[in-house]
Image: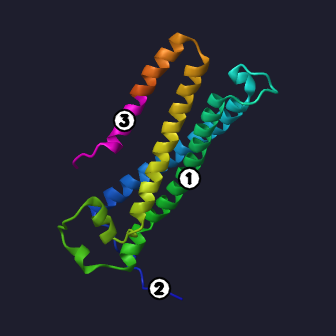
């Protein structure tokens, strides 16, 4: 079945093209970062599963701290893989905007000025409405992966390393998680 014809001469307005391009760049960077985090987490799982890393005999049961660290690492691994895959879905979704806009021309998008949020403008140019939920999923997966990576490292250092390392890593961890507040504390555009 053939869909509506595509206006092959159609081009997105510059502001919409810029928004779409910015999202594409962000999503591509996100895919790279989260795939690297997934690789790091896989390596850390091997390290954290070794009883020797916690000063235990090979046959000894895992300590509670070791189990907590492994759980944080598994969460980071699953969330980073999920974020990588979600990035790829979203890259495809945002990449389809020009074709969908050319196929399903909306008369209201022909005006020189339009009111609305960046998101509503992208939707007017045929970004699917469910994409917002997928973006929130992607962002929360990245945040969870990064936070669990930092926390698992901090818990390991605090439980296994000398006092000086514990103090330094605690301070660095607190400073490292401060940017997460950007997503928690509501702000204005």
Percent x, y of residue 98: 39, 69
Percent x, y of residue 180: 38, 38
State the residue at coordinates (51%, 87%): 2
State the residue at coordinates (36%, 80%): 104
**Front residue (pair 146, 11):** 146
Q: Sequence-wise, which precedes: disc 3 or disc 1?
A: 1
Task: Single out the mark in the foreground, 2 or 3.
Answer: 3
Residue 178 colored magenta? yes
Q: Is residue 160 above or below residue 126?
A: above
Residue labelled with disc 1: 82
**Front residue (pair 81, 161):** 161
Residue labelled with disc 3: 179
Measure the alpha-carbon separation of dots 2 and 3.
Answer: 45 Å
**Mark 1 surroundings: few (<14), some (14-19) or many (≥20) residues within 10 A:** many
Horizontal side of residue 21 vs 30, given as left or right: left
Residue labelled with disc 2: 3
Q: Sequence-wise, which precedes: disc 2 or disc 3?
A: 2
Horizontal side of residue 134 vs 105, given as left or right: right
Task: Single out the mark in the foreground, 2 or 1.
Answer: 1
Snapshot quadrant of residue 6: bottom left
State the residue at coordinates (62%, 29%): 65
Magenta segment range?
176-189
User: Which structural element holds mark 3?
Assistant: helix
**Prevailing SS of the magenta stretch:** helix
**Front residue (pair 73, 10):** 73
Asked whether the viewer can see residue 141, the reply is: yes
**Pointer 2 with pointer 1, Cβ within 8 A:** no
Residue 28 colored magenta? no
Horizontal side of residue 46 vs 152, given as left or right: right
Q: Sequence-wise, which precedes: disc 2 or disc 1?
A: 2
């Amino acid at each position: 079945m053939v869909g509506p014809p595509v206006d092959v001469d159609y081009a997105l307005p510059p502001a919409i093209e810029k928004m779409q391009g910015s999202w594409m760049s962000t999503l591509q960077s996100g895919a790279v970062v989260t795939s690297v985090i997934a690789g790091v987490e896989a390596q850390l799982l091997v390290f954290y599963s070794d009883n020797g890393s916690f000063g235990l005999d090979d046959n000894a049961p895992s300590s509670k701290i070791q189990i907590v660290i492994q759980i944080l690492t598994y969460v980071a691994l699953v969330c980073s893989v999920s974020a990588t895959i979600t990035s790829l879905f979203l890259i495809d979704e945002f990449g389809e905007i020009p074709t969908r806009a050319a196929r399903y021309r909306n008369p209201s998008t022909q005006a020189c000025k339009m009111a609305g949020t960046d998101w509503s403008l992208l939707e007017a140019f045929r970004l699917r409405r469910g994409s917002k939920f997928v973006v929130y999923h992607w962002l929360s997966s990245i945040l969870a992966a990064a936070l669990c990576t930092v926390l698992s490292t901090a818990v390991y250092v605090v439980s296994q390393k000398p006092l000086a390392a514990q103090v330094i890593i605690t301070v660095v961890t607190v400073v490292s998680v401060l940017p997460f507040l950007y997503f928690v504390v509501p702000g204005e555009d």
